[in-house]
Image (cartoon, helix red, strand yellow):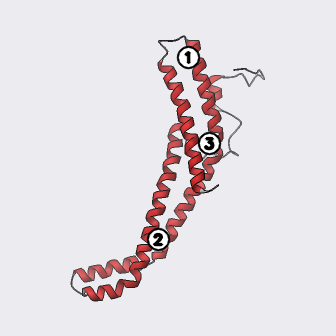
Amino acid sequence: MEREELLGRFNELLDTYEQHKAYGDKAREQAANFSSAVIEKVMADHQIKASLVSDDIGPLVSSVMSELESLNAAIAEAEQSKGDLGTRIEELELRKLIGEISDDDFESMTAEGRDTVESADNEIGELESVKAGVQSALDRWNNLSGTAYPIDPDDSQEVDDVVDSILPGFEEDGDSVEI
């Protein structure tokens, strides 16, 4: 899956997850106007739906994290491509400013390096912009789910905190619950 498609799908699922969480919260706010059984049923429905969406989000988190790592590597590579040219240009700017070299000398001494540095800086700017979008999506998931990412599927047990909070102890006894 390409980065844009991955991020689009991830944000789409986050929107759906957030919507179900909001519906549950709004139902809770109506507790004074409806019976507790109705409130609990609507809240449980949306908590379960949010949990199901969360199951779809989980596998994408590691892919989004990989994209973030890839962007960080590309930014580091672009920084390295500038090498010492950025520092050299800065040094020459200072030498020009203090009058040690003329404007013409500065232009001739920095002509080749300026293009390389400007190109790298433009690439870094674009990569930083994309990285901000990816980081924002991960941060949004962290805020919505209340857990820090990433959750490695291999490390997790077959436990669903949302379902367990709604139906505590039912699956432990082997009983099933129909909703």
Q: Nearer the viewer, mark 3 or mark 2?
A: 3
Give the distance between the C-alpha atoms of the residues marked 1 and 2, in whole angstroms. Answer: 55 Å
For badge 2, the amino acid type reads Glu
Residue 128: % across, % down: 46, 60
Give the distance between the C-alpha atoms of the residues marked 3 and 1, in whole angstroms. Answer: 27 Å
Say which residue label 3 marks. 57
> Residue at the location (50% across, 67% down)?
76
As displayed, is residue 57 above or below residue 130?
Answer: above
Say which residue label 1 marks. 39
Asked if the residue under mark 2 is in contact with the one under mark 3, i.e. CB atoms within 8 Å, the reply is no
For badge 3, the amino acid type reads Ile
> Residue at the location (37% across, 81% down)?
88
Residue 107: % across, % down: 31, 85
Packing grade of label 3 (10 A; few <14, some 14-19, many >=20) is: some
- Left or right of 35? Residue 84 is left
For badge 1, the amino acid type reads Ile
Residue 50: % across, % down: 60, 32
As displayed, is residue 100 above or below residue 156?
Answer: below
Say which residue label 2 marks. 79
Give the camera-side residue of 148 and 92: 92
> Residue at the location (41% across, 75% down)?
117
Marks 3 and 2, the one that precedes in the sequence: 3
Packing grade of label 1 (10 A; few <14, some 14-19, many >=20) is: many
